[in-house]
Image (cartoon, rainbow, N blue to C red):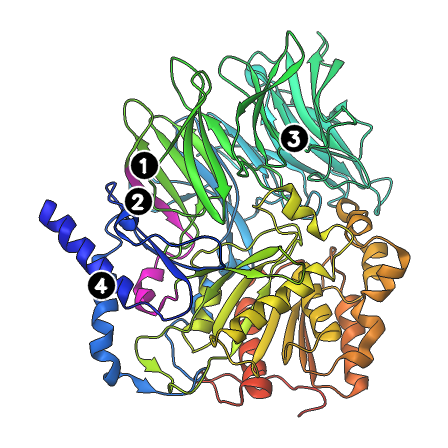
Amino acid sequence: MEYWKKTTIEMALSLFVGLTNRTRVSSLFSLGNGLNLSKHLPRQSSSTTTTTTILNLKNNHKLKRMSSSIASNEQENKKITSPYGTWKSPITADVVAGAEKRLGGFALDGHNRLLWVESRPNESGRRVLVREGEKLGDEPIDITPKEFAVRTTAQEYGGQAFAVSGDMIVFSNYKDQRLYKQFIGGPLPLPLTPDYGGPVVRYADGEFGSQLSSYVSIREDYRESSLNPTTTIVSIKLNDETIQEPKVLVSGNDFYAFPRMDSKGKRLAWVEWGHPNMHWDKAELWVGYFSENGDVYKRICVAGGDPSIVESPTEPRWSPKDELFFITDRHSGFWNLYKWSEQKNEVVLVYSLDAEFTKPFWVFGTCSYDFIQNNGNNLLACNYRQNGKSFVGILDDAEKSLAVLDVSFTDINNIISGPDCLLCIEGASATHPLSVAKVKLDDGKRKAVDFSVIWSSSPDSMKYETYFSLPEVIEFPTEISGQNAYAYFYPPSNPRYQASPEEKPPLLLKSHGGPTAESRGILDLNIQYWTSRGWAFVDVNYGGSTGYGREYRERLLGNWGVVDVNDCCSCARFLVERGMVDGERLCITGRSAGGYTTLASLVFRQMFKAGASLYGVADLNSLNADTHKFESHYLSNLVGTEDAFFDRSPINFVDKFSCPVILFQGLDDKVVTPNQARKIYMALKQKGLPVALVEYEGEGHGFGKAENIKFTLEQQMVFFARLVGNFKVADEISPIKIDNLD
């Protein structure tokens, strides 16, 4: 064993020596079984900007990868020399589209088997509830009959659309948005809520009441107003043979989330907030007490009610001892764990860390921590994010201690506790696609003793491992003195090809959506599609991104269209100045809010040579007037004054556009309506710039159909190749007509 360690260290150090000659490069190596090579590497000062290369070799992450990296120098002369962008890759658009499965909710059934909702790109994006197989390696079993789809459109973004207790499931059906009751292995589902003649009443984030006599859920009701639906917390009876109107428990505010009952059914906790705030700006946590007839008659504001404290409490959860735990960002600006002392009506800090123990509320059902089944003190399994990486920890409430588990994922979205194990939901790493993994714990519940993937969004992705480009975390200076921002840089990578030493690769910069969201350094075949063909790719976490605390997130307040644009341009400039990319072949892409940043960067700056906007925003005033209730005041905080709404809208400054643009839009989009893409398309066409618009019937805010995912990716590639790259792609792609060019 000692010889193996010594040999492995020598191999890693030799690989370290052979890394790129970019300035200030530091490397972190980690192996499974507790071996950490970072202590064998030379220390470097953190006072200057660094580029961090992360090689994840966990669970033996196949020493063959190290071997092939070392051997690649010997094979260099065998590679085909071909210009960047022309390389042939097995990671095709078909492969990418087939790997676009996503999760939309999760829970444990009465047999402690995991259920989750997964999207099916090859079934037009249909979402199906499935259950893990009885033993490891078994295929998941579909629970949802083909006549149904499990999806809620509450607040447009949806989220948790089902709950399970024992073998009973309650779920929201996509077509009519009604709640249905189903028994696993039983007959077809039966409706629980009234038929209103269409999907005008939506439900989300529900849970079963005590004795399974009721179901408590968020309800969004469009019957009185299609633009301003009423959101409430309601109770639905489960044991009545007749369908009845749900009973309203809590109402009066604009938004509600996380309705959670204690084990005895006597108290209900929930989170609420109102315009003009988004949840992450300011929210309140309440507890209400049930009367004998099932009404909530007494209410206490636990957190968020003090006007001197700016906070956004979230994720309330009752412990096995019926103590209320939750997460909030009071005082430090980081979302940390707290609990409520009911007797004193005080909020008590459980554990303090400059890290985010949750994420912004965009979809229902986030679960960032859970209670471990334990007879002693409260043990919490928690998932937190720090410096662009996720960690899984075991938090002891009594000892105020946090033990970090050694797991293969560097990025995790949700976590739940099972018997003797944790389930990491939507976990990933630089070499793992989005997956679900089971982490077995030791008897002391403090260490991970086994790690196994039970579901993967792309189970065949490892066959392309030698083509993977590993993300490098870069920290770069912004236009504000003393402020830095972050990004993940992916260099071109293909074992069969190389470019001439004189050539620099073209760059595709991605601006993430939200904009209150975060780019994450995980295996994304969308990105590998570009890098394996000879493109460099950079995913930017501009000021306003999440994962870095409230102060970083609030850089964007009043400055959307300024800070994000500046940071994207600063990142591109940073890469050009260091000789990592070709300054004459810089392209930018983004979805939704990222599409707005793309268009704003093209019109207000001259950094990029072409752009692709996927359901992006061109007119801020139009978005403000047309968008749904959830985001109807979002822009007030992001943009600010009426003058700013005009001055930062790309549609008002078409004369400043000077490069080609391609646009993609779903015709059923209720968040960024199709008129946004059509207006900017017509304006650019009239101006005489090369422009193309692709519209998809049956697609909303995001594309779910495999054929549309494929087409979007291929058309971006050939568009940039024709108009910026000046090369022919290796794939057989029939380009669409580009106005003012073809």
Q: Is residue 54 visible?
A: no
Point out the residue furthest to the bottom here: 742
Q: What residue is at 45 percent from the left and 21 percent from the top?
A: 400
The image position of residue 174, as x and y in percent, is 63, 46
Element at label 1: loop
The answer for how far apart the CA atoms under marks 1 and 2 are is: 7 Å
Quadrant in the picture for residue 79? bottom left
Quick one: label 1, few (<14), some, or many (20+) residues within 10 Å? few
Residue, disc 3: 331
Q: Amino acid at mark 1?
A: Glu
Amino acid beneath label 2: Asp
Q: Tag 2 or tag 3, which sits nearer the N-term?
A: 2
Q: Are marks 1 and 2 in contact (CB under 8 Å)?
A: yes
Image depth: mark 4 or mark 2 in front: 4
Q: Which mark is residue 138?
A: 2
| Magenta segment boundaries in residue numbering | 450-469
